[in-house]
DNA sequence: CACAACTGTAATTGATATTATTACAGTACG
DNA sequence: CGTACTGTAATAATATCAATTACAGTTGTG
């Protein structure tokens, strides 16, 4: 799994937690524990999808522009990490003179496509707002 | 996803395809397109689980000792790649003085544990024998 | 206007993970 | 005893990932 997925989710949850829904890349990076430039790259992607808006210049930063209860991890996954389940290493070779070796790439591919669908279905039940509630509950136990 | 999973599955399908269920690490490596030493490592793991037996020495190699219709990808996944869904990169820090940042690792962890269960459920419906049948069907279309 | 505080983006470096390769001891067969 | 294998570890080569640096562009403010 791509770790940009984690950064995206964490950032959205953090913004949802802020009363005004705002934070700079530096604040987010400190909370996520990564570099501001990396946050900017990931959040730039979320902006294109309309989940956040950005304001450049002094006093600028990122602001949540979606309802956290409406955005699911499946949305974020599709945006940041689609296809990450399939390993980049491939076995077999279509040119091979063996039924198994020549078809394995295709078959493995369809297996992982199915797995990815399954994963998305699971993620589609988890919202950014739900994660925030989950965290808040832990706090009070 | 760990690519050893792919090597393990491919090897098992290949052995299941062989009439006598046997092949040497060199034959398997040629079919999978990797190095024999790597095949030996993976198949050594499958041996410990009882899916194959090995014979050292001249004329030796690997032999399938299970019913391919009984072994699922979930079995192989658990053996080779358990926990591979979770990225090794972690956001947040439990020591942090922020509700979100300090709890994110735990919450993300539980998200990925659930995802892994989901994935295993999907894999548990796919057998080595089923994959071989799938390949054989493609051949005749 | 000039400056400070931001984002956007790309290039570079450094760290880590992955795969291939080599090497050799151990085992079995003929 | 020699050949053909597995088992295993160490090393080298490669690819991937994350941190860092750098700087142009934007915006609010004195």
Image (cartoon, coloured by chain):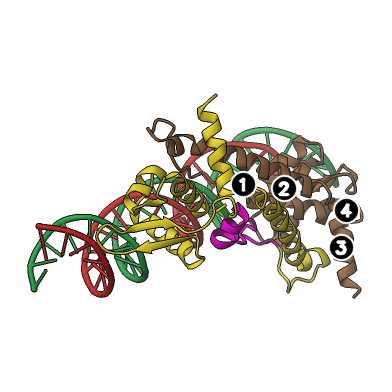
Chain colours: A yellow, B brown, C green, D red
The quarter holding residue D7 reads top right
**Of callouts 2 and 1, the N-terminal one:** 1
**Of callouts 2 and 4, the N-terminal one:** 2
- Judge whether residue B60 can be spotted in this image: no
Mark 1 falls within which chain? B
Mark 2 falls within which chain? B
Q: Nearer the viewer, mark 3 or mark 1?
A: 1
Residue identified by numbered label 4: B129
User: Can marks 2 and 4 be said to lie on one chain?
Assistant: yes
Q: Are marks 3 and 1 in contact (CB under 8 Å)?
A: no
**Of callouts 3 and 2, the N-terminal one:** 2
Q: Are marks 2 and 1 in contact (CB under 8 Å)?
A: yes
The x, y position of residue A1, in whole percent, is 57, 52
Left or right, B37 with respect to A37, comes to right
Q: Which residues are magenta?
A: A72-91
- Judge whether residue A73 can be spotted in this image: yes
Residue identified by numbered label 3: B134
Q: Which residue is at 72% across, 65% downward?
A: A105
The x, y position of residue A115, in whole percent, is 72, 55
Q: Nearer the viewer, mark 2 or mark 4?
A: 2
Is residue B85 covered in magenta? no
**Of callouts 3 and 1, the N-terminal one:** 1
Mark 4 falls within which chain? B
Which label number is shown at residue B119?
2
Mark 3 residue crowding within 10 angstroms, few (<14) / some (14–19) / many (20+): few
Question: How many dots with numbers?
Answer: 4
């Amino acid at each position: 799994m791509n770790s940009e997925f984690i950064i995206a989710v964490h950032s959205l949850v953090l913004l949802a937690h802020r009363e005004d829904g705002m934070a700079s890349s530096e604040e987010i990076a400190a909370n996520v524990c990564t570099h501001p430039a990396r946050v900017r790259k990931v959040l730039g992607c979320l902006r294109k999808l309309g989940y956040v808006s950005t304001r450049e210049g002094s006093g600028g930063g990122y602001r949540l522009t979606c309802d956290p209860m409406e955005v699911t991890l499946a949305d974020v996954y599709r945006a940041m990490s689609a296809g990450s389940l399939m390993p980049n290493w491939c076995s077999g070779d279509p040119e091979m003179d063996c039924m198994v070796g020549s078809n394995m790439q295709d078959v493995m591919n369809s297996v992982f496509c199915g797995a990815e669908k399954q994963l998305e279905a699971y993620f589609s039940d988890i919202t950014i707002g739900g994660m925030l509630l989950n965290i808040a509950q832990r706090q009070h136990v």
